[in-house]
Amino acid sequence: MAAARGARSFLRTVLRRDGKPLNCIDGLTAPDYSGLLPFTRQLGSVANGEKIRATLFPGDGIGPEIAESVKQVFKAADVPIDWDEQYVGTEIDPRTGSFLTWESLESVRKNGIGLKGPMATPIGKGHRSLNLTLRKELGLYANVRPCYSLPGYKTKYDGVNLVTIRENTEGEYSGLEHQVVRGVVESLKIITRQASSRVAEYAFHYAKTHGRQRVSAIHKANIMKKTDGLFLQCCREVAEKYPEIQYEEIIIDNCCMMLVKNPTLFDVLVMPNLYGDIISDLCAGLIGGLGLTPSCNIGESGLALAEAVHGSAPDIAGKNLANPTALLLSAVTMLRHLGLQEKADQIHNAILKTIEEGKYRTGDLGGKSSTTEYTNAVCDHL
Amino acid sequence: MRRGAMRVMEMVRWNGRRGVTYMPRPGDGEARAVTMIPGDGIGPLVTGAVQQVMEAMHAPIFFETFHVSGNMTSVPSDVIDSIRKNKVCLKGGLATPVGGGVSSLNVQLRKELDLFASLVHCFTLPGLPTRHDHVDIVVIRENTEGEYSGLEHEVVPGVVESLKVITKFCSERIAKYAFEYAYLNNRKTVTAVHKANIMKLADGLFLESCREVAKKYPGIKYNEIIVDNCCMQLVSKPEQFDVMVTPNLYGNLVANTAAGIAGGTGVMPGGNVGAEHAVFEQGASAGNVGNEKILVQKKANPVALLLSSAMMLRHLQFPSFADRLEQAVIGVIKEGKYRTKDLGGDSTTQEVVDAVIEKLD
């Protein structure tokens, strides 16, 4: 697979602050992020009336239905996006080692923006899991989950409005384990300056562009002094570059306790891999579960893949009962990443109003509407 | 299944005495020595509270106090010797400097005395408003290995590795302790918390050990849950959990989350136990050294340590004293007149202690 990739070296276009592109050949030079703005794509084309091409992976199970929902809402809102649909193949593609074809990955790389529905990883050996493939091939290094209480859907926690940003490539999930002797297993947790700085940069950039005041780094550096200590050091260095944003550090057990007592205390949370996994799921639980949580993965050179993190729910597939909220909210996150704030706000408010009204709610929110009824209601509210 | 403190209240409400009496052996009433480590921050305040209550009850224990601070490089050997002699210790919190060169004294103490099981009992107290009712979770956490092995090194500048070590020996003994605890305390379910879908070998070994031990206790239900799902379930439906057994790091998080759900870390009792020694301290470790403000105003919450000392009294086989202390503390919380700031009130530590002493019968 490496040989095939070497045969076609492709250029990534990364933008400098003055708008001129900097070409760097993938894998041969590591771009220096300090002078660049690698997080957003050029939007000059939108102003000209051109559409942005975005890859769409409908996924399995309820995936196709909720993807239809998103397409309908986007059309009603007149969003300048052209969907490029890609499907998971039925056989393993030898170039990627999984069921995702090389073409679909290329399409995401080219378009730089994507939306993914729930995918069920087929059980078996000899292939990588779909999520792992996407993560490695697209270099997705940060997972962003905005968690806010949906007005109208009451959980035991009110006023939640926080964003969890999780480092997605290293840490405890490096997969490097071995058995030392029988009955003794070691697992390596790796923290590098490069990955920590990258995710810290993204976190502060996100906070700045979305008008957030505070970034909290979550760690356990009192016990894991060197590893989480390095993570904290990188966060501190980045914090100095953004003096207008408050920065604090919170130990993870303290953070868990504060989250369940008073989640309104938090704004943006940035964390290494394992803590991020746990805390982001905890926050999803605070607002009502994975069926309502948007999520977005950020990759190299401003690539963003928004996804719905819930399962594919094969039992209600095809019955027009699925709740498209998670995918819709993820699509909104995608629009914000592209800088289309107006359209994003429009759709976001429409969704919130629909849920708040309570007339059209799908089964998992306690209502009786079908997917299409709910989608129509959202379109009406635009 | 009865939940929360209701079970204790039921047992003790019958004329304030137990149903069938506890028959001691001759000589059991001899005063027992207990090592006391006040610790840092609010530690001295809350351990002082415990001492006052013990004196008021004329409990057959006396404290040997040692002053240990979190800034020391290691726990002094006379403290360790005292704990080895007395077998039981009551401890306030020891502050751990963040990112510095000193390793945590709490962890050192646990490794030195081989206190392999840490137990935190999270239950909703009657009269204390929380978002969830009927929470009664006991988190049993492996205390010596896992992510807290302290084995870290810098591979090259900018790349750091930390080793997480899981051994069959430690996983087995913590699983055995969890099931034994469930058996002796009439608990119905034991849940193992893990992340074996990602850390297949390490957490896989932990799960294997739990499954093996589960076979020996057919009367106790056993199930497994992935740690991120577990946290999500804890914030939405905590009533489904009973006893949870976890490796080191997850246990820390789960215990603090459960403590937060059930009323806060200021009220949850806990302890660390090994084959030969036991150290009792405030259950959930978050905030156990408190902060400047509550130290200066003397408004630290002594309830957690008082309930832990009740656990200690039961461990030392003084059940009647334990019941009286527990009943008094729960009664004070229920009344609601004397509550510290973290429970929504405004009392000082001393006021709460006086109220507890008054409530003792």
Image: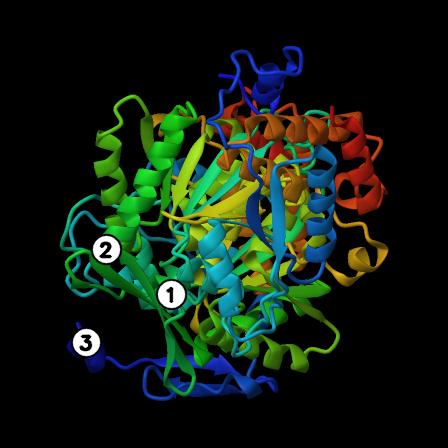
Residue appearing at x 61%, y 37% in the figure: B60
| Residue A262 located left or right of residue A315 | right
Which element is circle 2 on?
loop
Q: Label 3 belongs to which residue? A: A2
- The residue closer to the viewer here, B247 or A325, is B247
Asked if marks 1 and 2 fall on the same chain, the answer is yes
- The residue closer to the viewer here, B210 or A370, is B210
- The residue closer to the viewer here, A6 or B358, is B358
Report crowding for label 1: few under 14, some 14 to 19, many 20 or more residues within 10 A (C-alpha). some
Q: CA distance from mark 2 to mark 3?
A: 28 Å
Q: Picture coordinates of residue B135 (x, y %)?
A: 56, 29
Q: Label 2 belongs to which residue? A: B201
The quadrant in which the N terminus of chain A is found is bottom left
Q: Picture coordinates of residue B112 (x, y %)?
A: 41, 62
| Chain of the residue where label 1 is placed in the rendered structure | B
Q: Quadrant of residue A185?
A: bottom left
Amino acid of disc 1: Ser
Residue appearing at x 41%, y 23% in the figure: B186
Q: Label 1 belongs to which residue? A: B149
Residue appearing at x 43%, y 42% in the figure: B140
Report crowding for label 2: few under 14, some 14 to 19, many 20 or more residues within 10 A (C-alpha). many
Q: How is the image coloured?
A: rainbow
| Residue A30 visible in this rendered orientation of the protein | yes
Task: Name which of mark 1 and mark 2 comes first in the sequence.
Answer: 1
Amino acid of disc 3: Ala
Which element is circle 3 on?
helix
| Chain of the residue where label 3 is placed in the rendered structure | A
Amino acid of disc 2: Leu
| Residue A62 located left or right of residue A155 | left
